[in-house]
Structure formats: structure tokens, C-alpha cells
Image: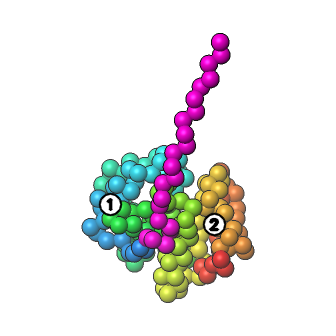
Amino acid sequence: MMRTQQVPPCPAPVWAPPGDAVEIRPARPDDEERIRRFLAGLSARTRHLRFFTDVDGRSASVVRALLAVDDRRDVLLAVAGEAVVGHVMGFTGGAADVEVAVVVTDEWQGRGIGSRLVRRLLRRASVNGARTVGMDVLGDNRKVLAMVRRLWPEAVMRVSCGTVEVTAPVEPRG
């Protein structure tokens, strides 16, 4: 006699607010614990795509580096309630006028938060004279590469050792 296996029902969809329900704001010194929780909540794949390695979010030096703001570095956070759901940092002194790195928690990806963070950071950088933006993106980071193609169709992309070096004008078209 053949037994049939009963398939469990699909879970009900979980409602989550749209990406515009988050506040984009500058990082503050009191954000250390929020950043620590943010890093701990990222999947290993998301951490790898952003940092190119697995990062120990408990490390005080990593947390401080992600919050460091000075005349060469700017940091913005996407915050939902008390939780950090996105982080973008820009720094000057690289090949482009401003180099950018962005990451959004897995649960909030695909809602435009990364694009909003990057746009806001670049507006701030352009006030200080930045005209070009650069990013290093892992070749298999399809979401960020799609964002780059959408925002900067004229971007120059060079493949080097598994990464894509992106250079584009600060003012995105998208």
C-alpha cells in the first residue's frame, strides 16, 4: 500500500512595511548597539556580498569602522523603528571622487532601500564637489549590479579577479 505524504500548507504571507517606511539618517555615536544587531542579523551570504568575507559583528573595531564619520567618510543608516535595516558609507581618496559601499538586511532587500541610501549619500557628496562614484561589487552580486545598471546606464564596469569595478557620474539617471 502506497502512503501519500501530506504537504503542509503554505504559511500566510507576512506583512512588512514598504521600503519608504524607513527613515534615512546620518549615523550617530549611540548607534553602536544597533549596528551590532544589524550585522548579527545579516545572512552569511549578505555579509560576504558586502564585505567580501564573513565579518564578526561583535568586534568593537568593525562596529566603530562602520560608524566612523570624518572629513573623508560619511555614513547613513536606514532605520525602521529602532532597528537598522540598511547601511551605506562613502569615502574619498579612492579612484573616484567618492567610493560607496551599501548593505541592506535580507528581509528588507528588494524594496528600494539600497537605492535610496546611495542616492542620499551621493547628494551629500556632490555638495562637497564629488563628480564621480566608484564601487567594487562581487561579480555574483546580481542585485547591486542591477541597481547600478538601472541608476547609471553609462557606468564603466571593469571585471577584475571576480569583482566588478564600477565608475559612474555621481548624478544617477534612474
- Asked if the stretch drawn in magenta spans residue 18, the answer is yes
- Which of pointers 2 and 1 lies earlier in the amino acid sequence? 1
Residue visible at 57% across and 61% down in the picture: 110
Determine whether, in the image, residue 37 is placed left or right of residue 171.
Answer: left
Quick check: can you spot residue 26? Answer: yes
Where residue 10 sits, quadrant-wise, is top right
Type of amino acid at the residue the image marks with label 1: Arg
Q: Quadrant of the C terminus?
A: bottom right
Determine whether, in the image, residue 62 is placed left or right of residue 140.
Answer: left
Q: Which region is colored magenta?
A: 1-22
Type of amino acid at the residue the image marks with label 2: Met
Please state the horizontal and vertical placement of residue 152, each as a whole percent of the image. 67, 73
Separation of disc 2 and disc 1 at Cα?
26 Å
Q: Residues within 10 Å of mark 1 (few under 14, many from 20)?
A: some
Residue visible at 60% across and 79% down in the picture: 170
Of all residues shown, which one is farthest toward the top?
1
Assign the magenta stretch its main secondary structure: loop
- Asked if the stretch drawn in magenta spans residue 128, the answer is no
Of all residues shown, which one is farthest toward the right?
154
Which is more toward the observer, 19 or 59?
Answer: 19
Please state the horizontal and vertical placement of residue 149, each as a whole percent of the image. 69, 68
The residue that disc 2 covers is 147
Q: Which mark is residue 34?
A: 1
Look at the numbered disc 2 and give the secondary structure of its residue.
Answer: helix
Q: Residues within 10 Å of mark 2 (few under 14, many from 20)?
A: some
Which is more toward the observer, 20 or 85?
Answer: 20
* Image marks 2 and 1: residues in contact by CB distance under 8 Å: no
Quick check: can you spot residue 95? Answer: no
Residue visible at 65% across and 56% down in the picture: 142
Residue visible at 65% across and 16% down in the picture: 2
Please state the horizontal and vertical placement of residue 1, each as a whole percent of the image. 65, 12
Please state the horizontal and vertical placement of residue 146, each as a whole percent of the image. 66, 63
